């Protein structure tokens, strides 16, 4: 059933190890068929919330609720693709009963992921920035070079790393290098925080 789904679907066991992926998930994340099975979910997704706060890792609440009463609702997560680009997805978790687990290759939880469009990403990030203000250097923008400002502005409009690179006619590696230089100047730690900074200061 999940194999033919147009949604990106993957399944993990109670330890957070990936036991199933469908073609849509592999395509969204940029991996080849079967490449991810046996990997830890947190190591693959490297997920953060829209304010750049780490979500994936040893404190992830989802595997821990397998033996309890699951109460996790849909949530947004910024995940990292194989090529290093980030993508915002909305994720729903479906927990299996013990009987079904025995017949589903040790899968305890299935996740269904849908990519949030670029406009939606900007809107959700803007909302989150008001709810959880990001600490940054409000004067840092003046320290950015003209090219760094251009890169940040394009990212704040919803462009991916590859789209920014194409628009400016240089490599994705160069875009990532610009972002690494932008972070300390703005006092942020991630692309997401940098974009929120741009939005809060009208730079987009």
Image: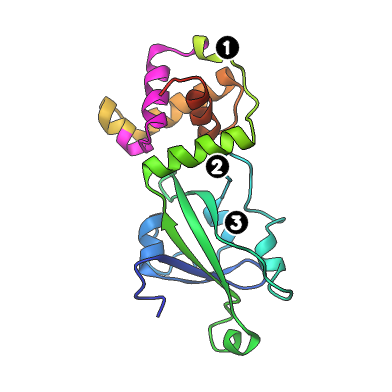
Image position of 37 (left or right of 61): left
Q: Nearer the viewer, residue 19 or 78?
A: 78
Q: Residue at x 43, y 51 (%)?
A: 82
* Mark in front: 2 vs 3: 2
Q: Look at mark 1 in the image and give the residue it sits on.
A: 139
Q: Which region of the structure is painted magenta?
A: 143-163
Dominant secondary-structure state across the stretch colored magenta: helix
Q: Look at mark 2 in the image and give the residue it sits on.
A: 50
Whether residue 149 is situated above or below residue 81 in the rendered picture: above
Q: Look at mark 3 in the image and give the residue it sits on.
A: 42
Q: CA distance from mark 1 to mark 2?
A: 23 Å
Q: Quadrant of residue 72?
A: bottom right
Measuring from the top left, give residue 203's x and y in whole percent: 44, 20
Q: Is residue 204 magenta?
A: no
Mark closer to the chain start, 2 or 3: 3
Image position of 12 (left or right of 174): right
Q: CA distance from mark 2 to mark 3?
A: 16 Å
Mark closer to the chain start, 1 or 3: 3
Q: The N terminus is located in which quarter?
A: bottom left
Image position of 123 (left or right of 52): left
């Amino acid at each position: 059933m999940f194999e033919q789904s147009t949604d990106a679907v993957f399944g993990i066991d109670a330890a957070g190890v990936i036991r199933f992926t469908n073609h849509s998930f592999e395509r969204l994340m940029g991996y080849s068929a079967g490449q991810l099975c046996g990997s830890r979910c947190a190591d693959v997704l490297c997920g953060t919330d829209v304010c750049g706060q780490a979500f994936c890792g040893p404190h992830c609440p989802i595997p821990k609720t397998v033996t309890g009463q699951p109460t996790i609702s849909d949530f947004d997560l910024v995940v990292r693709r194989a090529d290093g680009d980030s993508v915002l997805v909305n994720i729903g978790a479906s927990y299996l009963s013990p009987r079904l687990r025995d017949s589903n290759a040790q899968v305890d939880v299935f996740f269904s992921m849908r990519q949030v469009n670029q406009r939606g990403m900007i809107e959700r990030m803007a909302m989150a920035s008001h709810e959880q203000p990001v600490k940054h250097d409000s004067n840092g923008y003046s320290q950015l070079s003209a090219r760094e400002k251009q890169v940040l502005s394009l990212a704040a409009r919803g462009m991916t790393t590859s789209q920014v690179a194409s628009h400016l006619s240089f490599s994705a590696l160069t875009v990532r290098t610009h972002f690494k230089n932008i972070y300390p100047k703005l006092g942020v730690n991630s692309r997401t925080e940098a974009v929120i900074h741009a939005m809060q200061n009208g730079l987009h």
